[in-house]
C-alpha cells in the first residue's frame, strides 16, 4: 500500500443526551457504537455489504479485537466527526478510528479494530479476506 491513500471515511455525528453517563460525558461504551457506525459507512461507500455477504456467501466478519484510547470527553450535544480508515485487508480487516470535535478538530478518541472472515455455520476461520472484498477496499495483491 506504499504511496496509496488508504480507504477512509468521515462520519459527522452528535452526542445525544441518552449517551451520557452520570458524570455528564459520553459513556465509554458508546464510542464503540460510533466506531461501528463509521465502519459500516465506510463499507457502504466502497460497495461492501457484509450483511448480504453473510447471507449469500455464508461468510461472516466478526470483530475479534478492538481498542479505545480516550483523550478528551465528548459532552451533551457535541458535534464530532468519526473517521474510519482501513489499514489492512489481506488476512483480516483492520481499521483505525479517530473521533474529533467538529468545530475545533480536537482529538477526543483513537481506536482500532480487527475483523476476520469466518465460514458459517461451520465457524471455520478463513485465512484470507475474500478477494472481492479486498479489491473493493483497494487492497488487491
Image: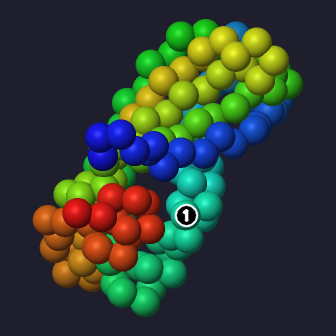
Placement of 96 over or under 99, stated as above or below: below
Image-quadrant location for residue 117: bottom left
Image-quadrant location for residue 111: top left
96 left or right of 141?
Answer: right
Q: Residue at x 35, y 40 (%)?
A: 3
Q: Residue at x 60, y 64 (%)?
A: 44
Q: Nearer the viewer, residue 111 or 20?
A: 111
Image-quadrant location for residue 2: top left
| Residue 93 at x, y percent in the picture | 33, 53
Q: Badge 1 is on which residue?
A: 46
119 left or right of 132?
Answer: left
| Residue 22 at x, y percent in the picture | 70, 16
| Residue 122 at x, y percent in the picture | 20, 81
Quadrant holding the C terminus:
bottom left
Placement of 127 over or under 111, stated as above or below: below
Q: Is residue 43 visible?
A: yes
Placement of 99 over or under 126, stated as above or below: above
- Colouring scheme, one of rainbow, by chain, secondary structure, one colour: rainbow
Q: Residue at x 40, y 59 (%)?
A: 138
Q: Nearer the viewer, residue 90 or 76?
A: 90
Amino acid at each position: 500500500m506504499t504511496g496509496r491513500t488508504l480507504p477512509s471515511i468521515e462520519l459527522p455525528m452528535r452526542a445525544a443526551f441518552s449517551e451520557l453517563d452520570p458524570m455528564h460525558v459520553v459513556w465509554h461504551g458508546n464510542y464503540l457504537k460510533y466506531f461501528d457506525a463509521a465502519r459500516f459507512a465506510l463499507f457502504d461507500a466502497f460497495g461492501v455489504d457484509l450483511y448480504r455477504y453473510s447471507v449469500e456467501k455464508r461468510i461472516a466478519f466478526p470483530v475479534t479485537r478492538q481498542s479505545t484510547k480516550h483523550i478528551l470527553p465528548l459532552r451533551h450535544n457535541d458535534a464530532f466527526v468519526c473517521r474510519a480508515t482501513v489499514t489492512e485487508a489481506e488476512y483480516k480487516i483492520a481499521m483505525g478510528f479517530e473521533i474529533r470535535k467538529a468545530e475545533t478538530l480536537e482529538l477526543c478518541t483513537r481506536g482500532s479494530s480487527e475483523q476476520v472472515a469466518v465460514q458459517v455455520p461451520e465457524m471455520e476461520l478463513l485465512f484470507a479476506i475474500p478477494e472481492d472484498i479486498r479489491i473493493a477496499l483497494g487492497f488487491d495483491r
